[in-house]
Amino acid sequence: MTFTSTEVTSPTSEDQGSADHRRRRVLWGWVIGFLLLATLAPFSGPLIEQTQYRLSSAWDRCQSDLRTIETCLARYQHNNGKLPTEAEGLQALVAAPPSARSKSPILKSNSLVDAWGGIYQYRPFVNDPSGYDLFSLGADGIEGTRDDIHLDP
């Protein structure tokens, strides 16, 4: 058995330098791309989540309900000369409290329930008798979280 040698050429230093240069460019491209992603990632997540959340039908329903309740609160204020107190709450729109001049209900009780089965929240402002905060606690049912839905202006 005899072995014949075949000529194997090694890359020239010029070829080797060119390949190293290409590898460095690719490596730097990956490093820069990773740094860009790492920098932008914290901003994109909440934005995408909020956009998806806003497009949901539950969000649309809550906005519609909040606008209806806002209209009913304006009617209550017109009929009674004031907004319901915090103790009376939105129930004053369903069953008029004893202090109300107009005893007729303005809203059905099922209109006070949001898309997740929670009750819409009503908080009159202490320093402004004509102002209030009206919102849904959202899917998690916890006040002060990102999924709370306030009436859009």
Image: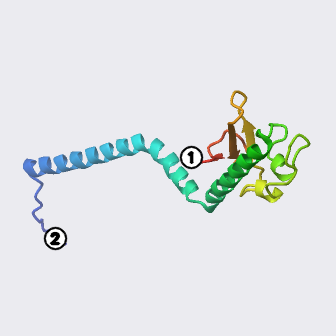
Percent coordinates x, y for residue 70 in the rendering? 69, 49
Residues 146 and 93: in front is: 93
Q: Going by the image, does 60 lie left or right of 124?
A: left
* Residue wearing tag 1: 153
Residues 55 and 13: in front is: 55
**Which of marks 1 and 2 precedes in the sequence?**
2
Label 2 amino acid?
A: Thr
- Alpha carbon of mark 2 to alpha carbon of mark 1: how far? 90 Å
Task: Please name the residue shown 22% across and 47% down the image.
Answer: 25
SS assignment at label 1? loop
Work out whether residue 130 can be spotted: yes
* Residue wearing tag 2: 2
Percent coordinates x, y for residue 109 in the rendering? 83, 56
Percent coordinates x, y for residue 36 in the rendering? 35, 43
Q: Going by the image, does 124 lie left or right of 64?
A: right
Label 1 amino acid?
A: Pro
- Judged by depth in the image, the label closer to the viewer, 2 or 1, is 1
